[in-house]
Amino acid sequence: MQAIIDFILELDKLKAVTRRTRPLGLDRYENSAEHSWQIAMLAVSLAHHAGTPVDIDRVVRMLLVHDIGEIDTGDTIVYAEDGWEARKAAERAAVARIFAILPEAQATALLAIWQEFEEAATPEARFAHAVDRAMPALLNLANNGQSWRENGITHARVVARLAGPIRAGCPALWDYMEARLDEARHAGWFGSE
């Protein structure tokens, strides 16, 4: 019991990891715990639109663990272009440390689901990636491009980073977003590099 409580209290640190997108109507930036909760709810809501039928419980588990490494590494904006290999290695070390707080069987299971998300080779992982990539963009669309404008993110960079994963996991979501992103480009909601 103590190991599980220690693990859950360690996860509380995810609330202190600041992201670059603001929640609707707030002046502060969202944190990684809020992001994980919101994309889990997005996945549950969109499950019938997945490109391939998915085990939604497995998807939700992936989405709840996928950013846990940020407790040690912090968040990197999804549109960053360099340093991903080093970042992923640091996240892998972080999740191994954090999951090791749990009894071995639970740690092994969570590490496996985290790795499945990272590899994006199963229908569940592809769908999880789709909603993970979509949510910051959906917030930006609702916030008049807040994070894109603040960070100089162009329309081309957003499309390059989002199109493949979202189309692979949830084609209907990409069809929706592609049209919204085009409207946002015409509205001037993107940054310039």
Image (cartoon, rainbow, N blue to C red):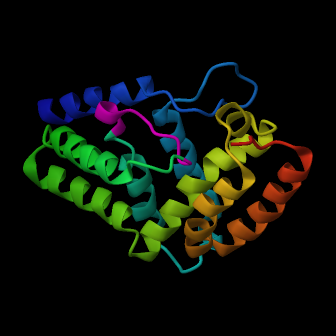
Residue 49 in the image: state x and y as whole percent: 65, 72
Q: How would you classify the magenta stretch by its main secondary structure?
A: loop
As rendered, which of 74 and 64 lies closer to the eye? 74
Residue 99 magenta-highlighted: no
- Does residue 120 appear left or right of residue 185 in this picture? left
Quadrant holding the C terminus? top right
Q: Residue furthest front?
A: 193
Residue occupying the point 84% across, 50% down = 184
Residue 74 magenta-highlighted: yes
Residue 188 in the image: state x and y as whole percent: 87, 43
Residue 113 in the image: state x and y as whole percent: 30, 60
Residue 178 in the image: state x and y as whole percent: 77, 64
- Does residue 150 appear left or right of residue 189 in this picture? left
| Quarter of image, res 157 | bottom right
Residue occupying the point 73% across, 35% down = 149
Residue occupying the point 31% across, 56% down = 114
97 relative to 163, above or below? above
Q: Residue furthest bottom?
A: 52
Quadrant holding the N terminus? top left
Task: Tell me, yes or no, if residue 55 can be seen here.
Answer: no
Question: What stretch of residues is rendered in magenta?
Answer: 70-79
Q: Residue furthest left?
A: 104
Residue occupying the point 67% across, 35% down = 147
11 relative to 125, above or below? above
| Quarter of image, res 120 | bottom left
